[in-house]
Image (spheres, helix red, strand yellow):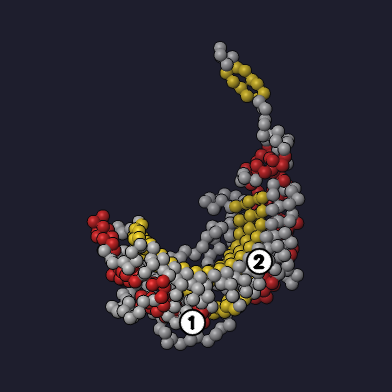
Amino acid sequence: MLETTKVCGGRIEERVCEDMISALPEDLLVNILKYVPTKDAVATMVLSKQWRFIWTMLPKLVYKENNLDKSKKSVWWFLDKSLQLHKAHVLQFLLIQLGPQCPSDADVGKCVAKAVDRRVAVLILELLWSADPVSLPNSLYSCATLEVLYLSHKILVDVPCTARLQSLTVLILRCVVYKNDESLDRLLSGCPVLKLIIVKRIKDDNVKRFTVKVPSLLVFKYEYYDHLDIPYSDGEEDSEVEEDSDVEGDSDVEEDSDVEEDSGRGLVIDTPALTGFKFTDYSGDSCSIEHTPCFEQAYIDVGGNFPDMDNFLRSFSSISFLKMDLTNEMIRCCKTIKFPRLTVCRICPWNSDWMDSLVPFLENTPKLKSLIVDYRLTNKPPMASASWSETGYTPECLSSSLEKFELIDYTGREEELELVEYILSNSGILETATISMRPLPDLNLKDKDAMMKKLKDIPRVSGTSQLVFKN
C-alpha cells in the first residue's frame, strides 16, 4: 500500500506501508468479519485477491430489509447472489428478514435448504412480505444440527411425518399459520430436548386445539389475541403486543353470565418439567394444564371471557412466583385458592374491584415475602368498600414472612393510601416499603412533599422497616 507524505522543502515522498491486517491468518480474518454487517463483509472482496474469498467462509450471515426506506431495492437480490457464492462448510447462524418490497416469487426455501446442508445451528426467518405464506423444505424439520428455530409471519408450518429435530432447544413461532393441528403435533413431538417455546398466535391460524406435549420443556410463553387481526408488516424482529394495548378487563361481565358451549378450541399443556409459564390470552378459548409438578413462575393476563377461571388458577397453586393482570373474576377465585409456596407476587389491578379480596388472598399465601402492586395500567379503579380491611384477623404472611412491599405509580388516591397504611401497620418483619411516584403534570413540589409526609406519618409495626421513595 502506498502512502504519500509531504516532507520539509515541499518535496513529496511516497513509501510503501505494510498491510498488517492482510498478513493475519485467514481464520483470524474470518473471525474479524463475523462482527461486521454481512453487506460490509461481502464488500471486502474488492480489497485485494487475498480478500476476495475471505467472506465466503463466514459462519454467520444476516440479511435484513431496510424498513426505514421501503422504496429501496429488496435485500433479497443481495441475499440470493451472495448465498450462491458462500463456501463455508458450516453455517452456524442465518437470519433472513424480507419485507413488502421483496418479489413474490423469491425462493426462500432454496436458502433454507442450503442452510440445512451447511449444518445450520440458528435459523431466524421472518417473512413480512405481501405474498402468501410459504412452506419450507421438509429437510428443515429433520436438521440434526439445528438448535434455535425462529419462524415469523408469512410461513406455513407444514411438518412431515419424518420430523426429527434432535438438537433443537429453542422454538419461536410468531404469527405463522399451520397446515392443521397434526402438523403442529408432529413438530413438537419431534423435538426431544426442547427447553423453550415462544408462541404468538393470530386469528385463523388453522389450529383448533393447540397441544403442547413436550416432556423436556422448561419455559413456555404464549400469546393469543383472537380478536386482533395482527398485520404482517410490523417490521420488528422482536416486537410484542404492548401490555397497555386497549384491552379492557371483565368489569362488565357478570358472575352469573351464561356459559358458552365448549367449542373444542383451546390450549392443552402437558409438560412435566415446566418451570416457567407466561400466558396472555384474550381469545375466550379454554386452557387445560396437566402434569406440571415443577411449576415455579407464572405470568397470567387473560380476558374477561376466559372459561373455567377457577380450575385454571388452581393449576398454579404450587408456584413460588406469580404475576397477575387482574380481572374481577380472577381476584374472586384467588380468595378461595391456597398458594402455600408463593413467595413473590406482583399484581397489576387494571380497573378491577380487587381491594375487597386482598385480605382473603393474603391469608392464602402464608409464605409471601414480596408483594408488588403495579398501578401503571390502572386508570380510575373503583373505590374499595369502607370495611375492606376490617376482617378481624391479620393474614399470617404479614405477621411472619412479608419482607418487601412495593407500590408502583402512586398518585395519592385514597385507595392507595389505605393500602400502604394497611401493609405498614400490620407487617411485623417488613424490611422495605418502596413507593414509586407517578409523574403528574399538575403536581408541584409542595403537593408532592405533602403526599410523602402523609406516608411517612403512617405508624409502622416493624421497627426496622425503611420507607423508600422513587420518582
On screen, residue 463 versus residue 17, left or right, reads left
Earlier-in-chain disc, 1 versus 2:
2
Tag 2 secondary structure: loop
Does residue 30 show up? yes
Location of mark 1 (residue): 310
Q: Nearer the viewer, residue 76 or 303?
A: 303
Q: Nearer the viewer, residue 96 or 375?
A: 375
Circle 2 Cα neighbour tier, 10 Å, few/some/many (<14 / 14–19 / ≥20): many
Q: Residue furthest front?
A: 463
Q: Position of residue 219 (x, y in %)?
A: 58, 67
At a point 45% along the width and 75% down the height, the residue shown is: 365
On screen, residue 141 versus residue 432, left or right, reads right
At a point 66% along the width and 50% down the height, the residue shown is: 61
Per the rendering, the mark at residue 194 is 2
Q: Position of residue 167 (x, y in %)?
A: 70, 62
- In the rendered view, would you say 105 is above or below 382? above
Tag 1 secondary structure: helix
Check disc 1 and give the amino acid type: Asp
Does residue 184 show up? no
Report the quarter where the N terminus lies. Answer: top right
| Residue 236, quarter of picture | bottom right
Q: Position of residue 29 (x, y in %)?
A: 68, 40
On screen, residue 261 versus residue 32, left or right, reads left
Q: Position of residue 43 (x, y in %)?
A: 65, 41
At a point 59% along the width and 75% down the height, the residue shown is: 293
Between the C-alphas of marks 1 and 2, the distance is 30 Å
Check disc 2 and give the amino acid type: Leu
